Structure formats: structure tokens, C-alpha cells
Image (cartoon, helix red, strand yellow):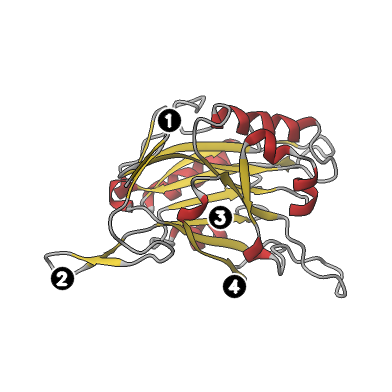
Amino acid sequence: LRLVGSEMCIRDRRRTRGTCRTRGKKNGSTQSNCLGLYYANITYLDKPKIKYIAAMSHFHLIGLCETHLRGDELSKTLRTFRMSGWTPLAAPASKSLHTETGTHGGVIILARNHLAARLSVATNSDDGTYPSDCFAWQLVRTRGLRFKFAVAYFQHGICLTGDNLDIIQNILDLTDHGRCHVLLYADFNMTPDDLIGTGILTLLNMVLIHHPFASGTCRIPHPDAPDKTLDYIMCTSRLKPLLTDTRINYAVPWRPHYAIELSLDTRPTSVRAVSY
């Protein structure tokens, strides 16, 4: 069976969908048939968090938002990730509008070096920085599948207006009005029901992956308030059946947001993040 779209071709490899199995190799080792993905809003990327994330060798792609890094601090962080076996792509944080020394936003995408990743031409410099403080993306190719891996941070309290509306326009441009396939993680700073109520999913021709996170992805400071679901996945509909093992990781060394882990049912051995 072969399903053909303008950006995606999926071949049935005679394996069970919904589970990520391993396949044997001649030397006796095994290799996963899935691409391991990790997402988190880390609410400032400091040295302990950098060390924690750099050691995640069992994931293939990592998306981080709200890093609050810019300038020399960001450059040092990207060098650390490169030395740890990652190819980074970053959107530097912007200066805060409210304080002299504060920052806003900041996004980093990490791809394992052994996946032969190269930075997208969307970057605005040779050091792998992206011309936005809240949005970045990378084109990813696997065997039989091509999609755009994106991370975004939406400002709280303004719904889909102002800078948040600019992010929606960026997502629409990524999908090429429905012709390309996109997998987006974001801290939307609104609940899934609120986002669905805007009708924006119809415009983007995308769906949400949020039911596995119904227990909440962000701890609310008030002791009597339940956790809120503010972080979740948006993707084009043909990618949804390939997403498996979606779960929340509560045991992360930062607060208030938890991390999201999932797998994409495609072989990671042939992944290339390439110029587009």
C-alpha cells in the first residue's frame, strides 16, 4: 500500500501500527523502528537543565520553548549541545518590554548528530539562530516520510491576537495551505477547548493531540487548583495515526510545566534534517 501526498509518501513495511518495535541487526544489536520525540517548556534553560537534556541520547529530536537565552549565553549553550552530540537550531529570546534585564520567549530544536542533521535555510546566521523569539522549525526526512518539526511559544492572556496571530500565520505558511505535513509542539497558553473554539484548526487543516494530557501539563501554584493542559501537539491529519506512546513525563527537574514524550512510527536511521 502506498499513500501519496505532495509532501509525504508512507509505505506499509508490514509491521504493526501503534507500537514501536525493534529490529535485529547482524551484530546482534537492536534498533527502534520509531523516531523518539521529546518536548518541554523549561521556563529558562540554565546549566543543570542543559546537562539533563544533553544526556537524552535515547531521543532523536527535542523541542524546547521559553529558554530565555540570547546573545553570548545562547551561543555557549549551543556549543555545549554540539559537544554533547546534538545539532541545534535556536530562536533567540527577545528583550522584555517590561524590565531592563528580562527576556521573553526563546526556542531550541535539537537533532542527534548521527542523524546527519543540517540546519534549515530559515536560519538568519551561520550559528543556527532563527529570526523569531517564539517559533522555529526543521524539515525532517525519514524513509518514506517528510514533515516539518516545529516548536512555538504563545504569549499568555492575548488568545490569538498580536504576536500569537503571527505564529498562526507562520504555521499556515509551513503547511503551504494544507499541502505539507507539520508536527508542532507548543505552549499554547490556552486550553485545547479554547483553541478549538477559535476555529483555527479548520483554517490550518490540522488536528490536536491532547487527550493523553487531560490530567494537565502545567502545575498551577494554587494548592487547590487542578493542573492545566496548556502544552500539547498540533499536527496535520495524516501524521496523527503515526504518533504512538504519547505520555507526560512528570519527573522533570523544572516547574511548572511537565515534559511530553512520544514516538513517530518511522525509521530514525534515515532521518535527515535538511535545507528546504
Crowding at label 2, few (<14), some or many (≥20) Cα neighbours within 10 Å?
A: few
| Residues under numbered marks 1 and 4 in contact, where contact means CB atoms less than 8 Å apart | no
Q: Which residue was labeled with disc 4? A: 251
Can residue 265 be spotted in the picture? yes
**Residue 228 versus residue 175 in the image, above or below:** below
Residue carrying label 2: 28
**Badge 2 or badge 4: first in the primary sequence:** 2
- How dense is the environment of label 3, judged by Cα within 10 Å: few (below 14), some, or many (20 and up)? many
Which numbered disc flags the more N-terminal residue, 2 or 1?
1
Q: Secondary structure at mark 1?
A: loop
Lower sequence index among marks 1 and 4: 1
Mark 3 or mark 1, whichever is nearer to me: 1
In the foreground, 60 or 246: 246
Mark count: 4
The relative height of residue 262 versus residue 129 in the rendered view (above or below) is below
Q: Position of residue 118 (x, y in %)?
A: 36, 36
Q: Residue at x 44, y 44 (%)?
A: 79
Q: Amino acid at mark 2?
A: Gly
**SS category of the residue bearing label 4:** loop
Q: Quadrant of residue 39?
A: bottom right
